[in-house]
Amino acid sequence: MAQTAANAAKPTSMWALLRDPRYLAFWMAGALIGVVRWFQLLALGVFTFELTGSPLLVSIVPLLSMAPMAMFGPIIGAVADRVDRKLLFAVSIAGICITSAVMGAIALSGTLHFGHVAFIAFMNGIFWATDMPIRRRLLGDLSGDALPTAMSLDAATGNGTRMLGPLLGGAVLQFVGVQGIFLFSAAVYGLCIVLVLFVRVQGSAKAAIPTSLIHDLRAGIQYVRGDMHLRRILGITVIFNVFGFPFTSMIPVIGKVHLAQDSFWTGVVSSLEGLGALLGAILIAMIARPGNYYPIYLRGTIGYILAIYVLAISLFFINGMPEAFGLVATVLVIAGMCGASFAAMQSTLTYLGAAPEYRSRVLGVLTLCIGAAPFGFLNVGWMASMWGAPLALFIMASEGLIMLLLLRLTTPIGKPDPGHYSASQDQLTAKP
């Protein structure tokens, strides 16, 4: 059997990974794309609120960015098993680069309206849907027996971009204008194309079942349905993305209404969740072992939703008070640390839980589960437009805890099997 990229590359430490030009190129591309992602989500959310004053429309922006994950994630995962992954990734970057440049030209002409914002948000979502089944699959393949280190490093970097992106987004929107958002994005995407095309890598793998695309899609979903561990992991992913993560769409509203801040300082507020995520990722990189991957994942999810509870209750009492900024900032940092626990383990557990020949398709199913987030954004946006952001966040967090309880009652999530993931980790170094 032909040797795959996973067997060809066997770095054993973070520094060995970063000395590998193939891993380095895709890791750096992921970092730059992450900056643009959070940069745009914050800036377009603030711009939409300034333009419309509607919390519901603010929540529509991330909704449209997440919806393509559910719509196209499994398809991209199946396609990625059949074509050159590097080429597919480069083509997708080129597409969003051109789209961002066109949107920048429209913004410069002074004719930008919410319809344009909605369009670019949806196009961004199509591009971001390629991350799990293509870029992260390549990172996993190239990391060899350093998979946990590779995924933790990528997660830590992604969490760092959650801090840097909103800071840049608020500053560019405040001092340059919305046209700067799109032109900056286009320039960064152009750099990513260069990075990806610079390295040579075996970009495709032989599909486990060389049949139709529809058959491959069904096979990925059936594979997950037949594995209790993957069902449990992906069930938590759905809950986090429907009842946890959508709270971030309310940060522009919190910054503008409850903290009375301008675009720059609203970006600072949003970046604090990313700061907590970066700190959490660093801590997880030091303590994570196969035996505690799942507890970190579950407890991070619970802690994140509880932090939303605290934030919601705080907003009922501190609206307009001088100490409001510090309290909100503290809660957001804690939420970010809990979110890092979820994010760092999500890809690792899913990757380890799937057989090598099914990993792209299972990561595509993971993207589908992440793509459930639009329901959460619509839910919290609608409630915020009716009753205000604090009550909306309180209700959403309550729904999340109820769903975790239901998952606990239907699957033994309190009794993870560490050996399952340890055995999967051992398979990474086994020759085919």
Image (tube, grey):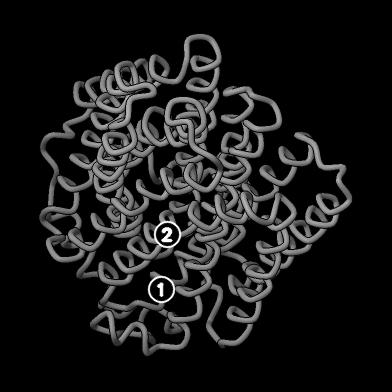
Q: Position of residue 137 (x, y in %)?
A: 45, 65
Residue placed most toward the observer, 208 or 374: 374
Residue denoted by label 1: 141
Q: Is residue 206 left or right of residue 405?
A: right
Please, is residue 9 above or below residue 78 in the view? below
Q: Quadrant of residue 17?
A: bottom left
| Image mark count | 2
Which residue is disc 2 drawn over?
A: 359
User: Mark 1: which amino acid?
Assistant: Asp
- Which residue lies most toward the top here? 386
The amino acid marked with disc number 2 is Arg
Question: Looking at this view, is 376 or 140 the one in front?
Answer: 376
Residue 201 relative to residue 23: left or right:
right
Q: In this rendering, does residue 40 appear at all?
A: yes
**Residue 212 visible in image:** no
In front: 23, or 228? 23
Crowd tier of the residue under label 2, counting other residues whose Cα lies within 10 Å: few below 14, some 14–19, many 20 or above:
many
Q: Does the CB distance between marks 2 and 1 fall below 8 Å?
A: no
